[in-house]
Image: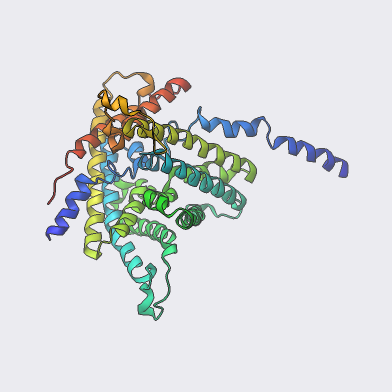
Amino acid sequence: MSVAEATAAPVKKVELFGKKERQIVKDPLWDNNPITLQVLGICSALAVTTSMKPTVVMCIALTAVLTGSNVIISLMRDFIPGKIRIIVMLSVISSLVILVDQMLKAFSYSMSKELSVFVSLIITNCIVMGRAEAFAMANKPWPSFLDGLGNALGYSVILLMIGFGRELLGSGALFGFKLIPQFMYDMGYVDMGLMITPPGAFILLGFIIWIQRESSKHYED
Amino acid sequence: MEELFSIATKAIFIENILLANFLGMCSFLACSKKIDTAVGLGFAVVFVLAVTTPVNWIITEYMLKDGALAWAGMPTVDLSFLQLICYIAIIAAMVQLVEMILDKFSPTLYNALGIFLPLIAVNCAILGTSLFMNTKGYGFVQSTVYGLTSGIGWLLAIVGMAAIRTKLQYSSLPPGLRGLGITMIITGLMAIGFMSFIGINI
């Protein structure tokens, strides 16, 4: 008994970052990206990406909520009755979102004004519900944590790409610093106002999806 | 009356909940392949929005706002941090209620809407409209009109999209662009169309 335990313990420790675990984190980053392939969580991806700063804050907020909700729901998975699981998940997620929202209001009020209702809308972000339903309800806390982290990072990758493109093309800046020098404007360069507006976000995301699907060879018919 | 009309045109065309605020994208992308399902889901959203927005207004005004509990003798209580969890609970309960009422009184409509009704509980357009209604500081009647017309705007967008996608089946696209990619780009073009309403003031 004690021998078995002694041999079992180190094996478990190695599995903490075993091949399967690394796969769980790596897979959603590009090859099975939640936004471009699973078509989840697009709503908030577009509204906050006019510049890099709110984009980064949004990514951090979503990462916190998604990993937190995955771990909590995974811990509770044996006690949640199947019929009312949606409302249980919603209450876990909304409690976490309230926490994030209140922290943002306390420490960075101007940013919380800028993001307006979109932090609150993480509740109905399909990634959070989707991962809770598809992964956390059926797996142990540690893999669920990794799955949440991986999907949140995959979401962040796409969000940062959109934010980068929209701020650079739309206002010639990154994080508020001007990148396009003045003489370019003098020579007749004009910022692309379309990128700041909603249609710019849709079209840019459309192109990112195209590139992503070509590179991962995932085609729809 | 004039003000309500202005709210309505703004919610349907100028600040379209889907094309300008990006809300309700997930079900918009998933259910716009056929016109029938798009129309069914669209009407379900209109219905639920028209019910939940005023109910959430009442909840905010008489329970959650700072000092809103004065009628119960507790003028110093501020429950506004409970806003999100209350809204989502109301929405889930309302969706359930709408489902049961429809099942009882109009089984044909219930069958037509089918699985879309429960899905609406997690549609960001519903929660988003309640939150916007709150930040814009509307009164009861204005909130009702705002909720209803936001739904109509969403219905307009999804039906238009379904119509375009039906035609799109006959086009030859690069394989990586098929499905989601081209849908996003067309949504962008639709949004440009709707942007031409900007500046119209009634």
Task: Please tell me how many numbered marks the rendered image carries.
Answer: 0
Does residue A1 appear anywhere in the picture? no
Does residue A195 appear anywhere in the picture? yes
* Residue at the extreme bottom: B73
In the image, is residue B97 above or below residue A127? below
In the image, is residue B114 above or below residue A179? below
Task: Please tell me which residue lies in front, A62 or A180.
Answer: A180
The answer to which image quadrant residue A16 occupies is top right
Q: Residue at x 25, y 65 (%)?
A: B140
Q: Residue at x 47, y 35 (%)?
A: A34
The answer to which image quadrant residue A149 occupies is top right
Task: Please tell me which residue lies in front, B7 or A142.
Answer: B7
The answer to whether A123 appears left or right of B38 in the picture is: right
Q: Residue at x 26, y 51 (%)?
A: B46
Q: Position of residue A93 (x, y in %)?
A: 49, 52
Q: Residue at x 48, y 32 (%)?
A: A33
Task: Please tell me which residue lies in front, B22 or B40.
Answer: B22
Task: Please tell me which residue lies in front, A111 or A126.
Answer: A111
The answer to which image quadrant residue A109 occupies is bottom left
Q: Position of residue B14 (x, y in %)?
A: 20, 45
The answer to whether B19 appears left or right of A99 in the picture is: left
Q: Position of residue B18 (x, y in %)?
A: 29, 43
The answer to whether A190 appears left or right of B122 in the picture is: left
Q: Position of residue B117 (x, y in %)?
A: 35, 50
- The N terminus of chain B sits in image quarter: bottom left
Give the colouring mode of the picture.
Answer: rainbow
In the image, is residue A182 above or below residue B138? above
